[in-house]
Amino acid sequence: MLKNKSAIVTGSTSGIGLGIARALASQGANVMLNGFGDAAEIETIAAELRALGVQVRHSAADMAQPEQIAAMVAEATAAFGAVDILVNNAGIQHTAPVHEFPLEQWDRIMAINLSSNFHAIRAALPQMQQRGWGRIINVASVHGLVASVNKSAYVAAKHGVVGLTKAVALENARTGVTCNAICPGWVLTPLVQKQIDDLAARAALSADEARAKLLGEKQPSQEFATPEQIGALAVFLCSAAADQIRGAALNMDGGWAAQ
């Protein structure tokens, strides 16, 4: 379905981003991977995607650095001829009460989880407008819709992503460029696994008990969403069937936000 299209997926060397990159590549899209990690492991991922018959590049651009984001978009455009699909997925987390929240952590979360979306969209959007087709998908979070304690920066940033999504969608409402947000609940990624491990250590629980407690507090389905499911939703948002889905915040959260 996406043959001859090209995508950038930020934060795509693991977790949700990798699931989205795999899904797009499986539909024929060339992919610019982005993220940190072991060079050999990243090359293994790239080789896996190339085996699907698509072009794959990797950018180590730091999503906290606007000039590196712009350079990544320029590199993908030069390599593939265009950036048709932009998936803003990169994100970090830090938990602490507001009055104890480290200032540097607040600034870094805002830079990576929110501002990077703006900088990437600003760099990629003009060529989408010029060609009359584009898909911008921002991976927000259920925390872009509801809040949790000790996550003030993450919640604020993800609410900002949902707002940015709406603004970009409205500005391009009469064009072939759409902008939407995916809002996952608990997804078993390295980021969430760290929270499970921290909970287990803090509460003297086994890994299974900590996992059940984490889900039980928020996610009525009692099941994690998967990177593959989120990847499938991203592919759908790139399809013609989603032409009139604009400015939506689609939660894939096992019922979390329905409570």
Image (cartoon, helix red, strand yellow):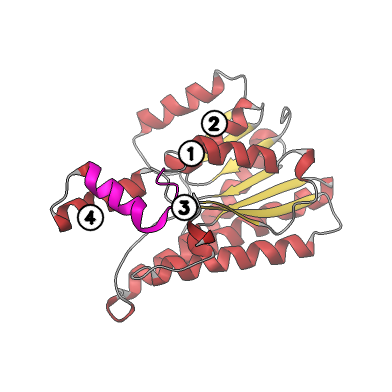
* Percent x, y of residue 91: 45, 55
| Residue at 78% in and 64% down | 171
- Hey, what amino acid is under mark 4? Leu
Alpha carbons under labels 2 and 1: distance apart = 10 Å
Q: Earlier in the sequence, mark 1 or mark 4?
A: 4
- Tag 2 secondary structure: helix
**How far is the residue under mark 4 from the one under mark 2?**
30 Å
Which quarter shows the N terminus? Answer: top right
Q: Secondary structure at mark 3?
A: loop
Residue labelled with disc 1: 227
Mark 1 and mark 4: Cα distance apart in space: 22 Å
Sequence-first tag of 3 and 2: 2
Instruction: Depth check: give the residue in front, 256 or 10.
Output: 256
Looking at the image, which residue is at 67% across and 54% down? 180
Q: Where, by quadrant of the figure, is residue 20 drawn?
A: top right
Q: Which residue is mark 2?
A: 22
**Magenta highlight range:** 208-223
Residue 212 magenta-highlighted = yes
